[in-house]
Amino acid sequence: MNAQNRAKSRWLCGWTAMALGVGVAVPAQAHEMEGDVFSAVMLDRLEARNDNGVYTAYWEGQGWMGGDLNKAWFKTEGETGQGKAQAADAQLVYSRAIAPFWDAQIGARHDFQSGGMPSRDWLAVALKGLAPYNFDVDAGAFFGSQGAAARFKASYNLLLTQRLALLPEAEANLYSKADPQRALGTGLSNLDLSLLVKYEIRREFAPYLGVMWSNKYGATAGYARLNGVPANQMFYVAGVRLWW
């Protein structure tokens, strides 16, 4: 295949992935010829959550810069309530393409100090990509002074029309060692399940509504109850997805 056909193939793959709603929307030119440097920023979730009249805000976003094979990725997520951050973290990783639609990543994660909880630093190792049946997956392992941790995230973009889509999402966090200072127990800490309905006004701008179930387990659930927080909650959410 000559250079022109390779470029055309990458261009078509980029637009096909975006049309199918695979993962987060990325401009097609981001998949073009190796050696060029491109970038993208995706705010996957920026939302307000309501649980029986108690409101919190949540964000989840990521961005990258690089070429076909090598990229620098930034990831962050967090939650705020009563005017202060309740939990927030950020990752900065080097990403290398190891297969079509799959990247291996290594770098650092920082859990920010918030709500009286101390900060934590981790070595981050992750596998990010597109699983069979078009599931977008981000699986990470983290190693630090508090032992090891793991985070698994998966989502699916089910198109109902060209603009309307159903978005089931799941996130689970596990810890090898209890961290009472951050109200975390050993084993499965939490499992969050979301079902969102988004409408793409433009590809770059998609408001959504939905429901989320947040479940804590083991000692983490016990810490939550001691702090006056239910171990199992259901939230109604409203938010927006952005990318540029």
Image (cartoon, rainbow, N blue to C red):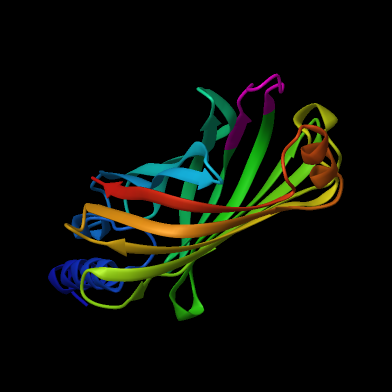
| 197 vs 170, nearest the viewer | 197
Left or right of residue 99, residue 234 in this image: right
Residue at image coords 34%, 46%: 42
| 65 vs 178, nearest the viewer | 178
Q: Is residue 113 magenta?
A: yes
Count of number-bearing discs: 0
Q: Position of residue 127 (x, y in %)?
A: 57, 57
Left or right of residue 135, residue 176 in this image: right
Q: Position of residue 169 (x, y in %)?
A: 51, 63
User: Up-down: is 176 above or below 21?
Assistant: above
Q: Position of residue 35 (x, y in %)?
A: 26, 49
**Which quarter of the picture shows residue 18?**
bottom left
Q: Is residue 9 magenta?
A: no
Where the N terminus falls, by quadrant?
A: bottom left
Q: Position of residue 225 (x, y in %)?
A: 80, 40
**Which quarter of the picture shows residue 158?**
bottom left
Q: Residue furthest front?
A: 53
| 140 vs 21, nearest the viewer | 21
Q: Is residue 92 visible?
A: no
Q: Main secondary structure of the magenta part?
A: loop
Q: Is residue 88 visible?
A: yes
Magenta segment boundaries in residue numbering: 108-120
| 92 vs 201, nearest the viewer | 201
Residue at image coords 84%, 46%: 176
Where the C terminus falls, by quadrant?
A: top left
Left or right of residue 225, residue 154 in this image: left
